[in-house]
């Protein structure tokens, strides 16, 4: 069995062809997003319980500086992302739950997007603790947290594509097709199903192993399938988490922008700027990480990186770009909800109701305030652009 670290804050792969000693056993350096440690391989012909520790080869590429960077950078960035993201996405869920009916497909997609982002963000404290002291909460939580991370990151990206398709369909003017219904529910189900399928390898292969005097949570692949599995998983994630959503968003928003400029609406610059902000934010946050990830997938197959400094650079690049990609979960509420006129109206109503409730409490006259203050004539289309 070959033990290597996965793509959710514990990333590792084969890196240095100069470390190979024979055709039977491969001596290689590995890195990961939160550990940046060398890894070890079990010989298929040996007892499966006898693990060969390759720390003795660590002089080939000592990565203490990468581990120190990870230990300082990840907890701080995750704490910031967790705080901002949970606040924004919780507000979105609360408004949909208490104030706003899920009338349109975009409403439904934004609600599912916020839920996916929240579940993703709730895994960050575990990975922050792992970056500092290792994995101390057992193999079950290792599998669950890893799969939740992959599932919700994937579903979040796919729901962004769904929103772009609905915005494109809005330009046709057929509002009846935009109502949330059975087809919308089926679409949401398919998105979650695809995300769950993508997270299955985490449930199957992730284990907790002792390494560098601390426990680590990462996948352990069979030696004879290691390269194939790692490369396949990497490529599937790049396609489903980046290429597919990006191409759908780029196509739909390009057509939508062209329709906006062809319309007679005098205030066409604002919706265009919103579309531009959505696409630009997606590119800025997701493209750098997927470039590094694609290079890593190619290196898994062809073993291109043979230099220790290059290996360290990739380590740090993975940590930084992955963290930037995660920060998109904090920006989604702003880009897809808070810019909508009706959503801002609900926020103002909640703020006013809360202020009124506080005054009632201070005056000793408690009174229940209804949060469901939706105007029957309100148009939820304001959420879309």
Image (tube, grey):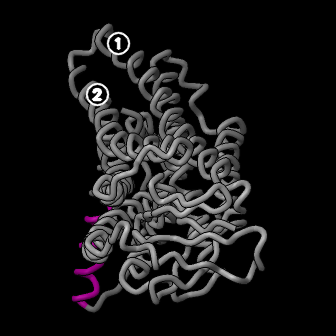
Q: Which residue is mark 1?
A: 258
Residue 357, given in percent of the width and then of the height, sits at 30, 77
Question: Considering depth in this image, is 114 or 341 the residue closer to the camera?
Answer: 114
Instruction: Name the residue rendered at 63%, 72% in the picture.
Output: 144
Question: Who's the residue at 60% across and 58% down the image?
Answer: 22
Of pointers 1 and 2, the one earlier in the residue sequence: 1
Quarter-of-image position of residue 263: top left
Vertical placement of 81 versus 192: above or below?
below
Quadrant (top left, top right, bottom left, bottom right) of the C terminus? top left
Give the CA separation, mark 1 to mark 2.
11 Å
**Residue, far bottom:** 364
Instruction: Name the residue located 46 percent from the left edge and 79 percent from the top edge.
Output: 56
Residue 327 visible in the shown view: no
Rendered image quadrant of residue 16: bottom left
Task: Assign the magenta stretch its main secondary structure.
Answer: helix
Write down the residue under mark 2: 271
The image position of residue 212, as x and y in percent, is: 45, 84
Mark 1 vs mark 2: in front: 1
354 is within the stretch colored magenta: yes
In the rendered view, tell whether residue 120 sits above or below residue 378: below
Label 2 secondary element: helix
Query: As drawn, is 79 to the left or to the right of 119?
Result: left
Check disc 1 and report its element: helix, strand or loop: helix
* x then y, percent, for residue 108: 55, 45
């Amino acid at each position: 069995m070959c033990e290597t670290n996965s793509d959710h804050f514990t990333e590792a792969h084969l890196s240095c062809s100069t470390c190979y000693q024979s055709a039977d056993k491969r001596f290689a350096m590995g890195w990961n997003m939160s550990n940046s440690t060398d890894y070890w391989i079990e010989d298929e012909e040996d007892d499966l319980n006898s693990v060969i520790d390759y720390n003795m080869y660590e002089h080939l590429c000592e990565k203490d500086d990468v581990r120190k960077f990870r230990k300082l950078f990840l907890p701080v960035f995750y704490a910031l992302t967790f705080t901002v993201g949970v606040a924004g996405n919780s507000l979105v869920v609360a408004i949909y739950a208490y104030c706003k009916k899920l009338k349109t497909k975009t409403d439904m997609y934004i609600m599912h997007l916020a839920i996916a982002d929240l579940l993703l963000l709730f895994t960050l404290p575990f990975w922050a603790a792992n970056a500092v002291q290792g994995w101390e909460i057992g193999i079950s939580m290792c599998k669950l947290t890893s799969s939740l991370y992959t599932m919700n990151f994937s579903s979040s990206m796919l729901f962004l594509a769904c929103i772009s398709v609905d915005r494109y369909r809005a330009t046709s003017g057929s509002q009846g097709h935009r109502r949330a219904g059975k087809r919308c529910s089926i679409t949401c189900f398919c998105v979650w199903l695809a995300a769950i399928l993508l997270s299955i390898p985490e449930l199957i292969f992730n284990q907790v192993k002792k390494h560098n005097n601390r426990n680590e949570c990462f996948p352990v692949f069979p030696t004879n399938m290691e390269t194939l599995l790692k490369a396949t998983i990497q490529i599937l994630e790049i396609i489903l988490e980046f290429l597919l959503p990006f191409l759908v968003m780029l196509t739909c928003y390009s057509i939508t922008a062209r329709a906006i400029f062809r319309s007679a609406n005098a205030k066409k610059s604002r919706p265009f700027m919103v579309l531009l902000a959505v696409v630009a934010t997606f590119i800025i946050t997701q493209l750098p990480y997927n470039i590094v990830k694609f290079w890593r997938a190619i290196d898994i197959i062809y073993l291109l990186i043979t230099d220790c400094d290059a290996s360290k650079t990739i380590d740090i690049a993975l940590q930084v770009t992955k963290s930037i990609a995660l920060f998109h979960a904090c920006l989604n509420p702003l880009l897809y909800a808070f810019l909508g006129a009706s959503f801002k109206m609900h926020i103002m109503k909640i703020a006013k109701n809360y202020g009124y409730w506080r005054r009632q409490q201070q005056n000793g006259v408690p009174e229940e305030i209804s949060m469901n203050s939706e105007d029957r004539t309100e148009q939820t289309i304001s959420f879309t652009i």
